[in-house]
């Protein structure tokens, strides 16, 4: 496999070697956000048709296919180079089911798969408005962090169209922007079913929020906070190492 890597790529372990991941050295590389989102979603993906919306290199899609026993997993990615990378990663890892990668946006996917096609949708959407902060000159990083392709409200609107009536839309987002996320969700008719905070350290500050949104969510369930960093190491799906 190493001979197939480009000079600007790395081959990295995922889930402590259970999966392998090709990544660009200088592009957008996965972070703890993807692991937290995977852990949050795994209890709900069994037997479900799963969509990873904005799959990047395919990290979350691969983890859910490997660990969650879903019926199917689709990753959709707008950026052509990242979609190609996700397809290579799907081919590299013989998960059951295999991850299907589609290059395009959610609008295209709705035409291909039909509305209400997915029982679980996961996403790590861009969290900066297009007119805020420094936009990276690296396009992979820019599209991953800033709302260049569509606004957060539009992102949620398109996700809702693809979501089955009793489905779960699960998102990881900066905790200090949770009010903006809640307002955008309410504006498109989505409510909060579950919520969990990721702290920078045990007893520390809220760094990220994980939310489970639905069309008829009922009362909100608050899950115990999870620390990102401890003396034993960084958050892992298999505990701290």
Image: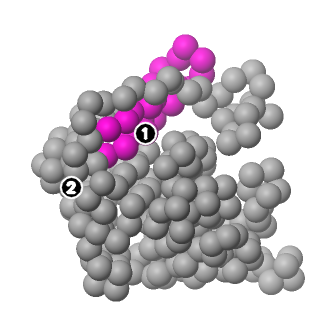
The count of marks equals: 2
Q: Residue at x 76, y 62 (%)?
A: 19
Q: Position of residue 32 (x, y in %)?
A: 60, 44
Q: Position of residue 166 (x, y in %)?
A: 30, 54
On the rendered image, what quadrant is the N terminus found in?
Answer: bottom right
Q: Residue at x 21, y 61 (%)?
A: 157
Q: Residue at x 73, y 40 (%)?
A: 238
Q: Residue at x 72, y 66 (%)?
A: 21
Label 2: few (<14), some or many (≥20) within 10 Å?
some
Q: Which residue is mark 2?
A: 153
Q: Quadrant of residue 90?
A: bottom right
Task: Describe the element under mark 2 as helix, strand or loop.
Answer: helix
Q: Position of residue 192 (x, y in %)?
A: 28, 38
Q: Is residue 148 above or below residue 44?
A: below
6 vs 184, nearest the viewer: 184
Which residue range is magenta in the image? 193-213
């Amino acid at each position: 496999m190493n001979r197939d890597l480009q000079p600007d790529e790395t081959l990295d372990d995922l889930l402590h070697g259970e999966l392998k991941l090709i990544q660009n050295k200088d592009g957008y590389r996965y972070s703890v956000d993807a692991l937290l989102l995977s852990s949050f979603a795994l209890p709900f993906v069994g037997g479900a048709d799963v969509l990873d919306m904005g799959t990047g290199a395919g990290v979350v899609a691969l983890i859910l296919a490997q660990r969650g026993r879903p019926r199917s997993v689709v990753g959709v990615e707008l950026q052509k180079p990242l979609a190609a990378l996700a397809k290579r990663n799907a081919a590299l890892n013989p998960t059951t089911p295999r991850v299907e990668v589609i290059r395009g946006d959610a609008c295209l996917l709705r035409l291909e798969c039909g509305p209400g096609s997915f029982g679980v949708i996961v996403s790590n959407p861009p969290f900066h408005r297009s007119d805020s902060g420094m936009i990276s000159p690296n396009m992979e990083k820019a599209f991953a962090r800033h709302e260049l392709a569509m606004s957060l409200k539009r992102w949620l609107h398109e996700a809702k169209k693809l979501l089955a009536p009793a489905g779960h839309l699960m998102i990881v987002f900066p905790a200090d922007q949770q009010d903006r996320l809640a307002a955008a969700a309410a504006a498109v008719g989505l409510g909060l079913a579950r919520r969990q905070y990721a702290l920078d350290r045990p007893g520390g500050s809220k760094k990220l929020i994980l939310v489970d949104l639905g069309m008829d969510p009922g009362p909100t369930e608050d899950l115990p906070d999870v620390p990102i960093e401890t003396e034993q190491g960084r958050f892992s799906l298999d505990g701290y190492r």
